[in-house]
Image (spheres, rainbow, N blue to C red):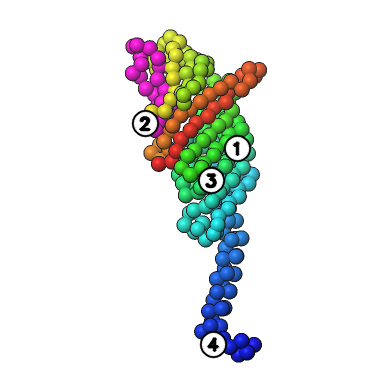
Protein backbone atom coordinates (compact mmCIF):
# COMPACT_ATOMS: atom_id res chain seq x y z
CA UNK A 1 0.00 0.00 0.00
CA UNK A 2 2.78 2.41 0.93
CA UNK A 3 4.67 1.48 -2.27
CA UNK A 4 1.61 2.30 -4.40
CA UNK A 5 1.18 5.65 -2.71
CA UNK A 6 4.66 6.66 -3.77
CA UNK A 7 5.69 7.74 -0.29
CA UNK A 8 9.31 7.26 0.72
CA UNK A 9 10.54 5.81 4.00
CA UNK A 10 11.00 9.19 5.63
CA UNK A 11 7.60 10.35 4.49
CA UNK A 12 6.00 7.26 6.00
CA UNK A 13 7.78 7.91 9.30
CA UNK A 14 6.59 11.52 9.22
CA UNK A 15 3.00 10.39 8.74
CA UNK A 16 3.24 7.90 11.61
CA UNK A 17 4.89 10.52 13.86
CA UNK A 18 2.19 13.06 13.08
CA UNK A 19 -0.52 10.48 13.81
CA UNK A 20 1.17 9.59 17.12
CA UNK A 21 1.36 13.26 18.11
CA UNK A 22 -2.32 13.79 17.32
CA UNK A 23 -3.22 10.69 19.34
CA UNK A 24 -1.12 11.81 22.32
CA UNK A 25 -2.66 15.28 22.25
CA UNK A 26 -6.14 13.78 22.12
CA UNK A 27 -5.37 11.54 25.09
CA UNK A 28 -3.85 14.47 26.99
CA UNK A 29 -6.98 16.54 26.39
CA UNK A 30 -9.02 13.83 28.14
CA UNK A 31 -6.62 12.68 30.84
CA UNK A 32 -4.73 15.78 32.02
CA UNK A 33 -7.81 17.78 33.17
CA UNK A 34 -8.90 14.79 35.24
CA UNK A 35 -5.48 14.50 36.83
CA UNK A 36 -5.44 18.24 37.56
CA UNK A 37 -8.94 18.04 39.10
CA UNK A 38 -7.79 15.17 41.33
CA UNK A 39 -4.74 17.16 42.50
CA UNK A 40 -6.85 20.24 43.28
CA UNK A 41 -9.44 18.12 45.09
CA UNK A 42 -6.68 16.62 47.22
CA UNK A 43 -5.20 20.02 48.11
CA UNK A 44 -8.52 21.63 49.01
CA UNK A 45 -9.66 18.41 50.68
CA UNK A 46 -7.00 18.87 53.36
CA UNK A 47 -9.35 21.43 54.89
CA UNK A 48 -12.68 19.65 54.66
CA UNK A 49 -15.11 17.86 52.36
CA UNK A 50 -14.98 18.57 48.63
CA UNK A 51 -17.97 17.57 46.51
CA UNK A 52 -16.57 18.11 43.03
CA UNK A 53 -13.77 19.72 41.01
CA UNK A 54 -13.69 20.31 37.27
CA UNK A 55 -10.85 21.71 35.17
CA UNK A 56 -10.77 22.91 31.57
CA UNK A 57 -7.73 23.88 29.51
CA UNK A 58 -7.01 24.19 25.81
CA UNK A 59 -4.63 22.79 24.90
CA UNK A 60 -4.56 20.56 27.95
CA UNK A 61 -0.78 20.20 27.85
CA UNK A 62 -0.46 23.68 29.39
CA UNK A 63 -1.69 22.08 32.61
CA UNK A 64 1.80 20.60 32.87
CA UNK A 65 3.05 24.16 33.46
CA UNK A 66 0.33 24.96 35.99
CA UNK A 67 -1.92 26.96 33.63
CA UNK A 68 -5.65 26.38 33.14
CA UNK A 69 -8.56 28.17 31.51
CA UNK A 70 -11.06 27.51 34.28
CA UNK A 71 -11.50 25.63 37.54
CA UNK A 72 -14.76 24.97 39.36
CA UNK A 73 -14.79 23.76 42.96
CA UNK A 74 -17.84 22.73 44.98
CA UNK A 75 -17.30 21.93 48.66
CA UNK A 76 -19.61 21.03 51.51
CA UNK A 77 -17.51 22.27 54.42
CA UNK A 78 -14.03 23.68 54.94
CA UNK A 79 -12.05 24.84 57.96
CA UNK A 80 -8.94 26.91 57.32
CA UNK A 81 -7.02 29.98 58.39
CA UNK A 82 -6.93 33.13 56.23
CA UNK A 83 -3.28 32.45 55.39
CA UNK A 84 -4.14 28.96 54.13
CA UNK A 85 -6.90 30.39 51.94
CA UNK A 86 -4.45 32.94 50.54
CA UNK A 87 -1.99 30.13 49.73
CA UNK A 88 -4.64 28.24 47.75
CA UNK A 89 -5.46 31.40 45.83
CA UNK A 90 -1.81 31.99 45.00
CA UNK A 91 -1.51 28.42 43.70
CA UNK A 92 -4.34 29.27 41.28
CA UNK A 93 -2.64 32.43 39.98
CA UNK A 94 -2.12 30.94 36.50
CA UNK A 95 -5.78 29.95 36.15
CA UNK A 96 -7.79 32.47 34.15
CA UNK A 97 -11.15 31.78 35.78
CA UNK A 98 -11.99 30.21 39.15
CA UNK A 99 -15.47 29.66 40.57
CA UNK A 100 -15.65 28.12 44.03
CA UNK A 101 -18.58 27.65 46.37
CA UNK A 102 -18.70 26.24 49.90
CA UNK A 103 -21.86 25.52 51.83
CA UNK A 104 -20.18 26.07 55.19
CA UNK A 105 -16.69 27.41 55.88
CA UNK A 106 -14.89 28.40 59.06
CA UNK A 107 -12.33 31.08 58.31
CA UNK A 108 -10.28 31.42 61.46
CA UNK A 109 -12.80 32.02 64.24
CA UNK A 110 -15.63 33.17 61.94
CA UNK A 111 -18.16 30.66 60.61
CA UNK A 112 -19.68 31.52 57.24
CA UNK A 113 -22.30 29.94 55.01
CA UNK A 114 -23.00 30.00 51.27
CA UNK A 115 -19.49 31.28 50.56
CA UNK A 116 -18.56 32.02 46.95
CA UNK A 117 -15.24 32.99 45.41
CA UNK A 118 -14.60 34.23 41.90
CA UNK A 119 -11.32 34.87 40.11
CA UNK A 120 -11.08 36.60 36.75
CA UNK A 121 -7.48 37.07 35.73
CA UNK A 122 -5.87 38.58 38.84
CA UNK A 123 -9.14 40.06 40.18
CA UNK A 124 -10.76 38.33 43.16
CA UNK A 125 -14.25 38.66 44.59
CA UNK A 126 -15.74 36.85 47.57
CA UNK A 127 -19.05 36.88 49.36
CA UNK A 128 -20.70 34.90 52.13
CA UNK A 129 -23.40 34.93 54.79
CA UNK A 130 -22.87 35.26 58.54
CA UNK A 131 -25.55 35.08 61.21
CA UNK A 132 -25.59 37.33 64.25
CA UNK A 133 -24.60 34.29 66.29
CA UNK A 134 -21.66 33.52 63.98
CA UNK A 135 -20.34 37.06 64.38
CA UNK A 136 -20.81 37.00 68.16
CA UNK A 137 -19.02 33.66 68.44
CA UNK A 138 -16.00 35.04 66.56
CA UNK A 139 -15.57 37.92 69.01
CA UNK A 140 -14.07 37.76 72.51
CA UNK A 141 -16.62 37.28 75.26
CA UNK A 142 -18.43 40.48 76.13
CA UNK A 143 -17.64 42.22 72.84
CA UNK A 144 -20.28 43.07 70.25
CA UNK A 145 -20.61 44.66 66.83
CA UNK A 146 -23.57 46.30 65.11
CA UNK A 147 -23.61 47.27 61.44
CA UNK A 148 -24.14 51.01 60.85
CA UNK A 149 -23.36 51.47 57.15
CA UNK A 150 -21.39 50.07 54.23
CA UNK A 151 -20.31 52.08 51.21
CA UNK A 152 -17.25 52.99 49.18
CA UNK A 153 -15.48 49.72 50.01
CA UNK A 154 -15.63 50.19 53.78
CA UNK A 155 -17.87 49.07 56.63
CA UNK A 156 -18.78 51.13 59.69
CA UNK A 157 -19.90 49.35 62.87
CA UNK A 158 -20.77 50.14 66.46
CA UNK A 159 -18.20 48.31 68.61
CA UNK A 160 -18.50 47.82 72.33
CA UNK A 161 -16.92 45.82 75.11
CA UNK A 162 -13.39 47.15 75.23
CA UNK A 163 -12.32 46.87 71.60
CA UNK A 164 -9.21 48.88 70.67
CA UNK A 165 -8.49 49.28 74.37
CA UNK A 166 -11.49 51.59 74.74
CA UNK A 167 -14.00 50.51 77.36
CA UNK A 168 -16.93 52.52 76.05
CA UNK A 169 -18.94 51.86 72.90
CA UNK A 170 -17.24 53.38 69.84
CA UNK A 171 -17.79 53.56 66.13
CA UNK A 172 -15.22 51.74 64.04
CA UNK A 173 -14.49 51.32 60.36
CA UNK A 174 -13.19 48.26 58.51
CA UNK A 175 -11.48 49.10 55.22
CA UNK A 176 -8.64 48.34 52.84
CA UNK A 177 -5.35 50.08 53.54
CA UNK A 178 -2.30 49.47 51.32
CA UNK A 179 -3.57 46.00 50.46
CA UNK A 180 -4.38 45.04 54.04
CA UNK A 181 -7.78 44.74 55.73
CA UNK A 182 -7.68 46.98 58.80
CA UNK A 183 -10.09 48.32 61.39
CA UNK A 184 -9.83 51.57 63.31
CA UNK A 185 -12.09 53.45 65.74
CA UNK A 186 -13.56 56.84 64.91
CA UNK A 187 -12.93 59.73 67.26
CA UNK A 188 -10.39 62.47 67.87
CA UNK A 189 -8.43 60.65 70.58
CA UNK A 190 -8.49 57.13 69.11
CA UNK A 191 -8.50 57.72 65.35
CA UNK A 192 -4.87 56.70 65.00
CA UNK A 193 -5.36 53.19 66.42
CA UNK A 194 -5.17 50.41 63.82
CA UNK A 195 -5.99 46.71 64.02
CA UNK A 196 -4.88 44.54 61.08
CA UNK A 197 -7.53 41.92 60.37
CA UNK A 198 -5.91 40.37 57.29
CA UNK A 199 -2.60 40.81 55.50
CA UNK A 200 -0.87 38.65 52.88
CA UNK A 201 1.92 39.55 50.45
CA UNK A 202 0.08 37.98 47.50
CA UNK A 203 -3.51 39.13 48.18
CA UNK A 204 -4.07 42.87 47.83
CA UNK A 205 -7.36 43.83 49.51
CA UNK A 206 -9.22 46.58 47.63
CA UNK A 207 -12.49 46.89 49.51
CA UNK A 208 -15.05 45.24 51.79
CA UNK A 209 -18.81 45.43 52.16
CA UNK A 210 -21.61 44.29 54.44
CA UNK A 211 -25.40 44.34 54.36
CA UNK A 212 -28.36 43.02 56.33
CA UNK A 213 -29.90 40.13 54.38
CA UNK A 214 -32.62 39.34 56.89
CA UNK A 215 -33.69 40.59 60.31
CA UNK A 216 -35.34 37.43 61.62
CA UNK A 217 -32.94 35.83 62.21
CA UNK A 218 -30.43 38.63 61.79
CA UNK A 219 -28.13 37.62 58.91
CA UNK A 220 -25.39 39.63 57.26
CA UNK A 221 -24.02 39.48 53.75
CA UNK A 222 -20.25 40.02 53.66
CA UNK A 223 -18.13 40.74 50.60
CA UNK A 224 -14.53 41.54 49.68
CA UNK A 225 -12.71 42.66 46.54
CA UNK A 226 -9.01 41.94 46.10
CA UNK A 227 -6.36 41.07 43.53
CA UNK A 228 -3.39 38.75 43.33
CA UNK A 229 0.01 40.44 43.26
- Reading the image, the residue beneath label 4 is 8
Q: Position of residue 60 (x, y in %)?
A: 55, 59
**Image point (63%, 39%), residue name:** 76
Q: Is residue 166 magenta?
A: no
Secondary-structure class at tag 2: loop
- Reading the image, the residue beneath label 3 is 97
Q: Earlier in the sequence, mark 1 or mark 2?
A: 1
Relative horizontal placement of residue 177, taking residue 26 as reference (left or right): left
Which of labels 4 and 3 is toward the front? 4
Q: Earlier in the sequence, mark 3 or mark 1?
A: 3
Q: Which mark is residue 134?
A: none
Q: Residue 134's image quarter?
A: top right
Q: Position of residue 70 (x, y in %)?
A: 55, 49
- Reading the image, the residue beneath label 2 is 178
- Reading the image, the residue beneath label 1 is 102
Secondary-structure class at tag 1: strand
How many residues crowd mark 1 within 10 Å: few (<14), some (14–19), many (20+)? many
How many residues crowd mark 2 within 10 Å: few (<14), some (14–19), many (20+)? few
CB-based contact (under 8 Å), mark 3 and mark 2? no
Q: Earlier in the sequence, mark 3 or mark 2?
A: 3
Secondary-structure class at tag 4: loop
Q: Is residue 180 magenta?
A: yes
Q: Position of residue 119 (x, y in %)?
A: 51, 41
Residue range corresponding to the magenta coloring: 179-199
Height in image: 113 above or below 45? above
Q: Position of residue 1 (x, y in %)?
A: 64, 87
Could you give the CA–CA distance between mark 3 and mark 1, rounded to whole angstroms?
A: 17 Å
Amino acid sequence: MWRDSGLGVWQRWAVWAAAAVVLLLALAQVILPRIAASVISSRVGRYGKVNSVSVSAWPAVKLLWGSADSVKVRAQSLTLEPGQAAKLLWEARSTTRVDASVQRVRMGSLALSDARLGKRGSALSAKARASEGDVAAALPRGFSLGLLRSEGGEVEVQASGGLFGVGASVKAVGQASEGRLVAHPLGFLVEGLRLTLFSDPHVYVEGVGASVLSKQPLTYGLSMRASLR
